[in-house]
Amino acid sequence: MSAGKSPRRRAREFALQGIYQWLLSGNSVPVIEAHMEQVSGFERADRELFVALLRGTLDNAADLQYDFAPFIDRPLSELSPVERAVLLLATHELKNRPETPYRVVINEAIELTKGYGGTDGHRFVNGVLDKLAAQLRAAEIEALRNEGR
């Protein structure tokens, strides 16, 4: 992680790593939190945001997958663990953190996927989240359109 990243970006990166760990290992949230807190650079992350994102995502993973599943073009089992983790995290933010603009959520998800995922994974994630945001944040998107008139 580079020195120029904001505490919020770092929190999302650590939450992503925790979700990824959960997907692959099935470790409990307390075990994952304890592990992430030991990783170099964690002290520069927004700890409160990290905990909220990690717990909120993992506590509701089944519902979050249900929310984004209609917008993916393959079975959930065929998503890479990074794509799946990013989609879980971003879906949680779109649903439960309305104070974060939807464009910020999508941009952060794209950047995380570029940093940790496969070559074109960010395009896939962007397409899924654009469609999901249109459903979950319709009022916010409409208000932005009306401002532009």
Image: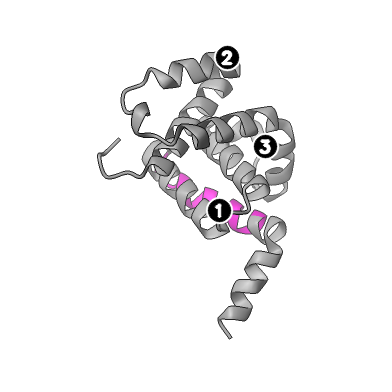
Q: Which residue is mark 1?
A: 100
Specify whether 19 is left or right of 98. Answer: left
Q: Earlier in the sequence, mark 1 or mark 3?
A: 3
On screen, residue 142 above or below 65: below
- Residue tagged 3: 75
Range shown magenta = 118-132
Q: Quarter of the image holding residue 23?
A: top right
The mark nearer the N terminus, 1 or 2, is 2
**Distance from the alpha carbon under mark 1 to that under mark 3:** 29 Å
- Viewer-nearest residue: 79 or 101: 101
Tell me the tag on residue 27. Answer: 2
For the residues bearing labels 1 and 3, Cβ distance under 8 angstroms: no
In the image, residue 135 above or below residue 122: below
At horizontal 47% and vertical 45% (from top left) the residue drawn is 121
Structural crowding at the residue carrying mark 1, measured as other residues with C-alpha within 10 Å and reported as few (<14), some (14–19) or many (≥20): few
- Secondary structure of the magenta portion, mostly? helix
Number of numbered tags placed on the structure image: 3
* Magenta-drawn stretch contains 123: yes
Q: Nearer the viewer, mark 2 or mark 3?
A: 2
Q: Residue furthest left?
A: 3
Q: CA distance from mark 1 to mark 2?
A: 28 Å
Picture coordinates of residue 72, whole percent (x, y): 65, 46
Q: Amino acid at mark 1?
A: Thr
Instruction: Identify the secondary structure beneath mark 3.
Output: loop
Residue farthest front in this picture: 48
Q: Which mark is residue 123?
A: none
On screen, residue 138 above or below 58: below
Q: Position of residue 25 (x, y in %)?
A: 55, 15
Could you tell me how far apart the alpha carbons at marks 2 and 3 are, in whole angstroms? 24 Å
Tell me the element at label 2: loop
Looking at the picture, tell me which residue is in the foreground, 70 or 2: 2
